Image: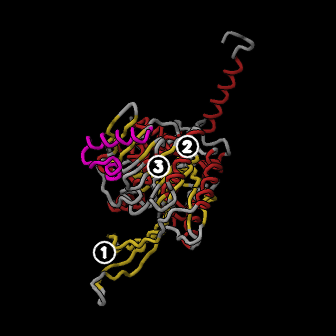
Amino acid sequence: MYERWLNQVTHLGTPKVLLVGDYILDSYVYGDAERISPEAPVAVLKVVDRQFRCGGAGSVAADIAALGGRPLCVGVVGRDENADRLRAMLTEVGADVTALFSVNDRPTTSKQRLIGLAQHRHRQQLLRIDEESDEQLGADENARLLEAYRQYLSQSDIVCLQDYRKGVLTEDLCRTMIQLAKERGKRVLVDPPLGRDYGKFTGACLITPNRKEAGMAAGMVVETLSDAERAAAILQERLRLEAAVITLDKEGAWLKTAERSEHVPTIPRMVYDVTGAGDMVLAMLAMAIAAGNDFSTAVQLANIAGGLEVEKFGTATVSVDEIVNEILSRSRGQRGKIRQMPALANDLNYHRQQKHRIVFTNGCFDVLHRGHIEYLRFCKQQGDIVVLGLNSDSSVRQIKGPTRPINNQHDRAAVLAGLESVDYIIVFEEPDPLSLIRQVRPDILVKGADWAEKGVVGREFVESYGGSVVLAPLVDGKSSTATIQKIQSLSIGTKANEPRGTTGG
């Protein structure tokens, strides 16, 4: 099971996801809340930080991009500063915002959250300020959206509708979009709003209401798993869906298709903030289904992604590496090894408190061989904790050329995580590891002996605070390049010996 999940999540590919819906700018104002105003019995918020994040359909777009997909955004914003900021943020993560149109007399939907900090760190939401219009779009705006949708549809792998009831996804528009998608063989996934009538989503592939939304749409209260089973069956049949997926917070999800009805459990979480969990579920479902996975596998992966999201504050993305780490954690019954900053920094601080010596090394580790194994064992012998900086796919291409790596960064990290000599793995994008070395601040920096004359990157920094640099002996004739060349030569030899001109297959 775990092996299958790892294989699926590391091969999601780069699908183009046509995403239509309500694009929202989420803003967070953090401040110390340590006194009461003398003017009124309210907390005084002394601002210490401001953050902006993509919300609504924008959150789904950011989640898709974090998972490796390409979001094609269709929706509306106002003609204001918030629109400029939202477009810039979406563009930065790799979304296509060409069809995120500005309209007059309508603000960019925004949600500003005022967050009080007790003792400078404990977060508590005090107030939310919404700026929006839920008036339905006019005929001209609808026509413009539909035209963009038609143009994008042919190049898309899957369609998502994210409805927050802000006037964009009208009944006529939804029905037309779903029909056009079906005519072109494209599946439509829907994250619906709270409401009693989901008729406009009839004929979609899949719908993902939460417990409360499903209950209202099905005309019942969803408390137990039996309730969820019945509500899912009602929605799946009434809306003529391929699948209904009811998300059930700590109980996971219920999946209903024409062939199966099953509970897909999840594991208990330390829930920090449920904001954006539904967006993450929709994003992962879209990515997994576009990659060819069945509904059950897609829901399993969506459960994991949504669970990781609720452990974060506010609308937040979840990476493939985090999901790989979670799957590895479950398979081993302990925490995984793949990390991101600042989580790695926190772990290393703990080890330093325990007087552990931190060893750092880095490399591509494309096709694992005996030389790699002995090298990493040598690293482990130099200290207590080995941190391995793994070159990302893009940085490997810069170093090795356009035909490398053979194995993608998620597969390489997963294999390395199975080695006892490696304690932590972090993927880095730069061609050299200097920035990462500065963040890790190792006691010992290890590189192969072939770097003696080339100069070890990070040596000056590590030695500046009393750390040391150690060169590891090499195993003669063992390298990824040599291994790949041998495989290629064997392949060429096999083809040369194949009989030619025969018939009969």
Q: Residue at x 49, y 52 (%)?
A: 171
Residue type highlighted by circle 2: Gln
Q: Is residue 371 left or right of residue 385?
A: right
In the image, is residue 214 part of the stretch drawn in magenta? yes
Badge 3 marks a residue whose secondary structure is helix
Of the image marks 2 and 1, the number of the one nearer the N terminus: 1
Which residue lies most toward the bottom here? 38
Marks 2 and 1, how far apart at CA:
51 Å
Examine the residues drawn in magenta and state their main secondary structure.
helix
Closest to the camera, between mark 1 and mark 3, is 3
Residue 451 pos. (x, y %)? 60, 51
Marks 2 and 3, how far apart at CA:
11 Å
Residue occupied by mark 3? 200
- The residues colored magenta run 212-241
Q: Is residue 100 left or right of residue 240?
A: right
- Asked whether the viewer can see residue 456, the reply is no
Of the image marks 1 and 3, the number of the one nearer the N terminus: 1
In the image, is residue 462 part of the stretch drawn in magenta? no
- CB of mark 2 within 8 Å of CB of mark 1? no
Q: Is residue 462 left or right of residue 42?
A: right
Residue occupied by mark 2? 179
Residue type highlighted by circle 3: Lys
327 to 42, vertically: above or below: above
Question: Mark 3, residues whose alpha carbon is within 10 Å: few (<14), some, or many (≥20)?
Answer: some
From the image, which quarter does the C terminus lie in? top right
Residue 72 pos. (x, y %)? 59, 53
Q: Quadrant of residue 262?
A: top left
Residue type highlighted by circle 1: Ala
